[in-house]
Amino acid sequence: MAGSAFPVHSAEPVERLRTLLGTVRPCGAGFTARCPAHDDQHNSLKVDPGDDGRALVKCFAGCDTEAVVAALGLGLADLFADAGTAPRLAVDDQRPSPPANDQGSGGSDRAGPILAEYLYRDAAGPVHFRVTRHDPKTFRPWHRDPSGRWTLGMGDVAPIPYRLPELAAADPRRSVFVVEGEKDVDRLAALGAVATCNPGGAGKWRPEFGAHLAGRRVVILPDNDAAGRRHAARVAAALHGVAAGVRVVALPGLPEKGDVSDWLDAGGTPAELKRLIADAPAWRPPAAPAGPSLVVTSLAAVRPVPVDWLWPRWLARGKLHILGGHAGDGKSTLTAALAAVCSTAGTLPDGAPAPRARWRFLLAEDALDDTLRPRLDAHGADPSQVFAIEAVREPDGRDRLFNLADHLPLLEAAIREHGIDVAVIDPVTSFMPRTDRNAEGDVRDALTPLGKLAERTGVAVVGIMHVGKPNGTGRRPLQQLLGATAFGAIARTVWMVAPCPGDTTGARRVLGVVKSNLAMKPEALEWSRAEDGPIAWHGVSKHDLGDLLGGAPARPRDDAEGFLSELLRGGSRGAADVLALAKAAGIAEKTLRRAADDLGIVRFKQPNARNGPWLWRLPDGTPASAAVDEDAPPKVATPEDAPVAIFGSTHWSGKVATAGETGHLPPSEGATEGGHLAGFGGGHLLAGALRSPDGLVPPDLAETARRIAALTPAERTTYRTELAQAPPDDPNLAHDRAAFGIAEAALAGRPVPGWAP
């Protein structure tokens, strides 16, 4: 029957198994043997012939039939009479073993015991790559490296459909079943059907797979869940117009997440499946909706599942977490310590056993070679279980900084390829370059896809963030994350780190959960770290993170340092922009400049531009060198060489020169000769030459006056009103008021009040 999906069997698989198994002993109509799927010291495997010629296999020690046949390099189809008479033991067909450092005794590795193995062969027959199935249910791909060694991941190997040789050899008039997983393909093949699937499960169908099904009649059997139905629709859309016909058949009576194997186990038959196929309509693309529509789900169809904890009540698979703290409080060291514990399946800080887990770091502030790797080594990590993303490489060879808005698909592929369990993004705002971190909508648009990625892949995502100053204003710890409240709202769990009060060494810290949507918050823990040493844990803390973060003495410079570190991470910024953005963030200019000094911020004139603006950059930022330092003192303390800033002149306005270079400008009435000038006629101001009783006017005051003088009249009027309405004793505005007076006096051509030449 050329068009039938289920041909008649005719072979002797029992004899094939007898040939492959050792220590065979006759038993009834069949035989017993040592099971190849476990360390069998007795003949616990029983093989009997079935009525239709199939081999009936049972391991009385409990091994799954798939695991037994996979251990022999076979598939379930080989238990049936049409699978051929010769054992598949060519070099490429032998069951490959995982590398020694990825597999322990008993055929298990860090993902759990291997239950089954699926060999993906190219159309000619050799093994192209393989996939192992583990308990608990996970799937891991393997490819051969250039030396021939099996290596975890796909590498550069292009994926192909499963059982491709059988698909290529099948009569083109026969229907081809497309299902979601390899187990279902083998089950259908055991019934004589032509079947295939893509590697990776639901959502991983590629358009190029359609070439192998061109001109064929395709029957898609979706799993009974939302992901299965979406997958079926995606495959159908990809094959529409490529295959001769496409039908999607929803099998009746399936349990939630059930598949065709479950349907057959429940009594479904090939004859009934043929009837369902005949009754199913040809698939057609759905009509485009006239407008948006709601996606509504009945909660009766939602199956509750427990939280999958990597660290109970702290770190959950498939969820987004935030770790906040001040600069220098050890957030990055803490994540390295936890990665080290998980890399060796050690003991977690609260005494719980750690699962063996792989961590991946995406770092903007720390180097891999002199920072992250030494921290891992200090904590006894297995570095083979820790990965880092250095950059995004474009096809032309250029490297770019990772961007959450553009590169999440690359991150998801890398997580799946390397079997990553935890992804650390440090700090998360550094990888949101086009996002306003203070705008609720922008932050939600950036983080919501990241949370969905965590759900799809099961990876625990930990975003590192800076927090604001703990000034006792009553703000909750969650509100101190620098940026929009959406950061804390979208994260399912938020950790915070704070200094431990009463610690004279300054090295002790408190780690706690300040928000959890997943469980009761655990007790806070205390830890410390000696210089260049590992973290030491000191058990449960008596301190409350809310008190430590909300009412501790103010540390305004921490806020400013975090602001500068993130703002200048991408390169230099104009001084005026830095000051304006800091002011908008509630950071006083005096505090900002002190923080800049602590960080070693370089302030310099734009290179190769006589009238270029002042720029700020990090010590290791770009450009790599600066010709002029903004805060450097004058080269010579004489009036003729004193640096000056000039306003109000058509030719000189905004330029930096010396008093000597501007000596031709006529002084205004009451001004003093010789460069020590309070003002010039027409509003010329030599701010750098102004003297107070203690010396020259401070350069930062002169710079602020220059910026105010450059404002439009309307902007200056608005600014004047704001200063007038502010409390007169506000110390944060004393600098602004003095600079405003200098600017207005200069523009009016008057001597600057309060400053004597």
Image: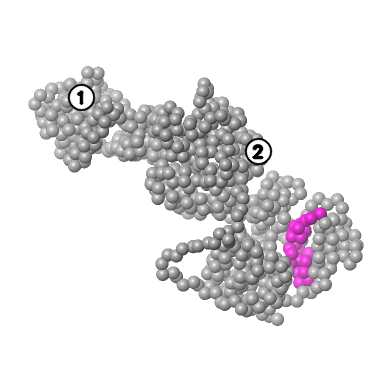
Residue 194 appears at what percent x and percent y? 67, 71
Where the C terminus falls, by quadrant? Answer: top left
Per the picture, the main secondary structure of the magenta-coloured stretch is loop
Relative side of 11 to 635, left or right:
right
* Label placed on residue 352: 2
Hey, which residue is sitting farthest top in the picture?
A: 693
Write the residue at 54% across / 34% down: 511
List the residue tagged with mark 1: 690
Residue 178 appears at what percent x and percent y? 62, 68
The vertical placement of 121 against 602, above or below, is below
* Label placed on residue 119: none
The image quarter containing residue 199 is bottom right
Q: Which residues are magenta?
A: 61-88
Kindly state the secondary structure of the residue where label 2 is placed: loop
The vertical placement of 242 against 605, above or below, is below
Residue type at mark 1? Leu
Residue type at mark 2? Ala
Hey, which residue is sitting farthest bottom in the picture?
A: 1
